[in-house]
Image (cartoon, rainbow, N blue to C red):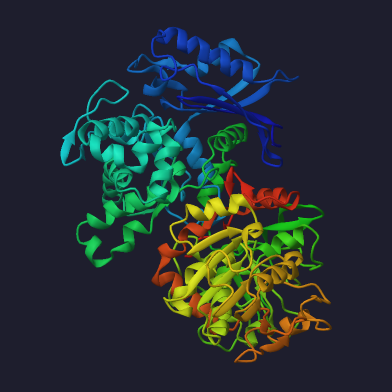
Amino acid sequence: MSAPGPITVLDVGGTHVRSAAWSPGDGLGDTLDQPSPSRLRHPGTPVAELRERLLATLCAAVPRTPGGSVAGVSFGAALDHRSGTVYGSAPLFGDETTPLDLRGELRSRRPDVRWHIVNDVTAALLHFVSAPHRRAHRKVLLMTISSGIACRTVDLRSGTIATDGCGLQGEVGHLPASAVLAGEPVELLCDCGRPGHVSSYASGPGLRRMADVLRERAPGRWERSHLGRATAEGAAFEPALHAALDAGDPLASELLDASTAPVADVLRSALCLDPELDELALTGGVASGLGAHYKASVLGHLRREGLYLTGERAPDWATDRITVCAPGEANGLIGAGLAALDAERPAGSGAQAEAATATEPTAPATHPAVVREGEATHLRQRPTPAPGPGELSVAPLVAGVCGTDLQILRGLREDGAPVLGHEGVARIVEAGPGVADPRLVPGARVVVNPTHPSDPSFLLGHNVDGMLQARMLVPESAVSGGLVLPLEEVPGGNLPALIEPLAVVRYALLALARHEPDTLLVIGDGTVGHLAVRAAARWLGRSVRTVHVHHTRAGLEWSAHAPHRADHRVVRDGLATGTPAGTLDRGRVAVLIATPAPATLPSLDLALGATEGAEVAVDLVGGLRRPAFSDWFPGIDLSEVRAANCGGTPEPPVVARLTTADGRTVSVLGHRGVANEHLEYAAAELCRDPERYRDLVTHETDLAGAAAILTGLARNEGRIVDGRRLVKLAVRTETPS
């Protein structure tokens, strides 16, 4: 049976009702967001009236079409999705638990619509586990922490979400819980009207009530805190809390830790009772909104009080399974569409049947890939070739999107590979005959050096298909050239997306270290620029002063809230001679230019103008168009200077001593690619100190999400994705076995 065409999908919560059109081919259309007619918004309105308003809202959202329409509803309530009966929802209806035959009521009002209703957490979970890299999981639990709290668990081997005799599962928000603030126990009411539930303390409303308690118990600390000052000045609670956590406010951290303690208790219990859970994900406005802060708080509880014996013998067993979803990673609208699409298919051919067979070890004849097509990228199925003599078939696990990728998409480079991506980690699936290295065997996790030092026909993601796909063929020249590096230890989470750019930074800083700089001037606020600032003390020495030049005020503001930042931060227009560090015009200054190719020469001009009087060494990390001439160095093609070092050779790198037009002598070098040792050191550094770099991976998605994001970035010059500044996008394509 073919797909039923666009499905109207709705997501009903305590604060909003969202609706859109969705189909597997075209994805999610424009979303209409309107306030929920709920008890949370209208506390004095009778439940019967709230229900009538809600039914009218849902019916009005589905267009009338010839032959009838299909609607998938993600509903924020304890409900039996077998029958569509709603038992209760504290955010929607308060403590009312009289059953509502939601499906029957909707059918009676709109009989032309085929209504498919699931719990909102079920919907979010269906989207979450649809990512290809999760298909090898056994079980996945997803908990939403928003105006309410609940969870669902799916067994991907059978494709089932088990329920009890009432069709319920995972109503953890109403489990008994306790909390402590300012050294004393707290007892608060849940929205269901009973005291001492998980939601009493950990839901969005519960977290605000906890803040009220802390303000009453510690008024002096509250007034002096970042959070207290911000709310006193009229800031909304949620952004004020996020900003306070960014600023390292101890009171805000205490508040969050008290609120997440019941959540950590639930996760600990779930892992204790079901060790087959391969991933436990947290989503919803509270968890995803606070992102890294929320995850750090939950992991702190689990590290302090983990699983009995397992916490001592395998301390990371529990914490490695925790994920805080990025915005859009567990989308209830898409999940509602998947559920409706599954229900519309003949028995045995839907998503549950597919999930049950997804872990079969047979090699796929095709695999999904993000493919460039004109101005856009699309998720396409591509043939999966078996490896020939000397070749390797690998499954990328985490791939990073680089600024160079965006230049290719925007037509600033002429690289021809249809599939981009040269950063990340992969798992070997199959080795072709004649692969000599005994370490390169199926199951080994590897990083592929994207730049061959002597074979220009291999440049991963540029003239050879890259890592934004579920399978990748590594050609014999790269394998025999030693460019496939097994890793004994792989950085956790999405950090593998930073291995290659951090290797570039290591190469640059070690080269500049020979200059023995007093100051490091970094121009560029992309991934490499931020990594250089954070790694400067590691590879240049702790006494080096760092100055970070940003392209925009927005970039400067992002850095101002980052946990690790330069000693001095300016926008380009604010970098004048001798400022801002007070040492740019004296001593020894190392300049690292990490910009897109069109900005490299203007950035060089800026740096040399600001460092007049200092001893200067410049590393042209950013690309250069050929030829590349600067008025500072008449007759010198700087692209040739940069090309003198490729793939980590020679060692030490070639450094040109150039004379400027005004008689100064400047050391200039550049490089394309890195040596294997730089990649190995970068991976080790990310394992050694992951928290120094983790926040730079600002976005994470799957292949389908990457196709949409890259298309959007290709059509504009901005850096905003899902309302947040993009530094590094990590793309997960598969989970290692």
Quadrant location of the N terminus? top right
Query: Residue 441: image x %, image y %?
Result: 52, 79
Image check: 736 left or right of 58? Answer: left
Query: Residue 334: image x %, image y %?
Result: 58, 37
Q: Is residue 687 above or below residue 732?
A: below
Residue in view at x 54 percent, y 42 percent: 127
Query: Residue 442: image x %, image y %?
Result: 53, 75
Q: Is residue 153 above or below residue 85?
A: below
Image check: 270 left or right of 540? Answer: left
Query: Residue 613: image x %, image y %?
Result: 62, 78
Of residues 721 and 225, which is closer to you in this image? 225
Residue in view at x 67 percent, y 23 percent: 69
User: Which residue appears farthest toward the left when viewing the image?
Assistant: 184
Residue in view at x 79 percent, y 62 percent: 412
Residue in view at x 53 percent, y 63 percent: 361
Of residues 417 and 437, which is closer to you in this image? 417
Image check: 736 left or right of 321? Answer: right
Quadrant of res 380: bottom right
Quadrant of res 436: bottom right
Q: Is residue 601 above or below residue 82?
A: below
* Residue 427 is at least partly visible in this image: no
User: Which residue appears farthest toward the bottom when viewing the image?
Assistant: 651
Image check: 387 left or right of 194? Answer: right
* Residue 233 is at least partly visible in this image: yes
> Total number of numbered labels?
0
